[in-house]
Image (spheres, rainbow, N blue to C red):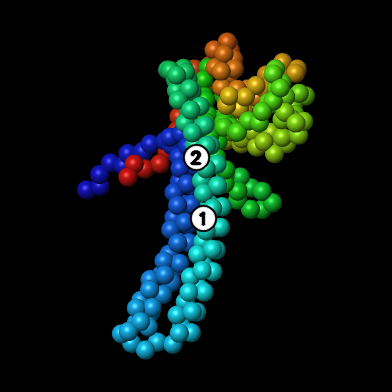
Amino acid sequence: MNRKQHFRTHVQGESLENQINLLYDKITEILLLPIVIFVATIFICMIYIGVLKVELLTVVFLLILLVVFSIRAFFKIKKLHRQIWHYRKGLDGERYVGSMLEKFSSNKTFIFHDIVCEKQNNGKIVKFNIDHVVISTKGIFTIDSKNWSLPDREYNQADFVFKDGELFDSTGVLQKDLMDKIDSQGKWLEDKIHEWINQRIPVYRVGIMIGAYVKNVNKDFSKFWIVNDSAFAGLFDREKEKMPMQDVLRISDSIRRFVEKPIK
């Protein structure tokens, strides 16, 4: 008799945590060959010293291999550790924003984390994830959290400036890739909701820049909310209810069934 299967949704930063574990697996693989060569070199050196006759050339060859692959492993591991550091910083950011969002959770507001998505791009399937999704009577929000290391700036100088639908950093560099990412997340969810309930409902595209000073020149929050963590909380509190509870329940149920995974 089959036992009942139970399901759960993702937790904050689950995809990033999986990526970090994969990188640690790669580090183990990289270290494996130098370790094998090191053990073989020690073994042959012991033989060369007195147990069996072994050519000196064999020992030298193994020592050269050990040095070459050890240097190669060092630089590869250094690069992977840098990636792990960035992933961990992103993971901390997602968990921080996730815990903040959970405070809004109620019978009118449903919070989902780490939504793994797929879309077609030039005939290929591309996977991406949405850090957080909020389904509420106040609206629907896709949220991308950014825990960047912010450079030093002058007093009262913005870390980011949002103007006319474009985002610039403190040096004036256009952050087009980030805005495209935030926009595509919102569009993906809009398309999915239309597929699920046959209604076209607008989705707020949110970018939470943790700890940053974000200047919204036009004071425009009609489509994009590019804000820091404290500003999002204030905006969400002040937002008026606009969605019928029936739609909130239908959409939250649909997204729950989309993201749920078996409990092992």
Residue 135, percent across and down? 51, 24
Number of disc labels = 2
Going by the picture, which residue comes out furthest to the front? 49
Asked whether 197 or 80 is in front, the reply is 80
Q: Amino acid at mark 1?
A: Ile
Asked whether 249 or 6 is in front, the reply is 6
How far is disc 2 from disc 1 in space, using C-alphas?
A: 16 Å
Q: Is residue 101 left or right of residue 194?
A: left
Q: Amino acid at mark 2?
A: Arg
Residue that mark 2 sits on = 88
Above or below: residue 13 compared with residue 36 = above
Frontmost of labels 2 and 1 is 1
Above or below: residue 139 compared with residue 42 = above
Mark 2 falls on what kind of element?
A: helix
Of mark 2 and mark 1, the one earlier in the sequence is 1
Q: Is residue 162 left or right of residue 11?
A: right
Neighbours of disc 1 within 10 Å: few (<14), some (14-19), many (20+) = some
Above or below: residue 177 compared with residue 223 = below
Residue 257, percent across and down? 44, 36
Residue ID at (72%, 15%): 219
Residue ID at (47%, 18%): 104
Residue 92, percent across and down? 49, 33
Asked whether 241 or 144 is in front, the reply is 144
Mark 1 falls on what kind of element?
A: helix
Residue that mark 1 sits on = 77
Neighbours of disc 2 within 10 Å: few (<14), some (14-19), many (20+) = some
Q: Is residue 75 left or right of residue 260?
A: right
Q: Are marks 2 and 1 in contact (CB under 8 Å)?
A: no
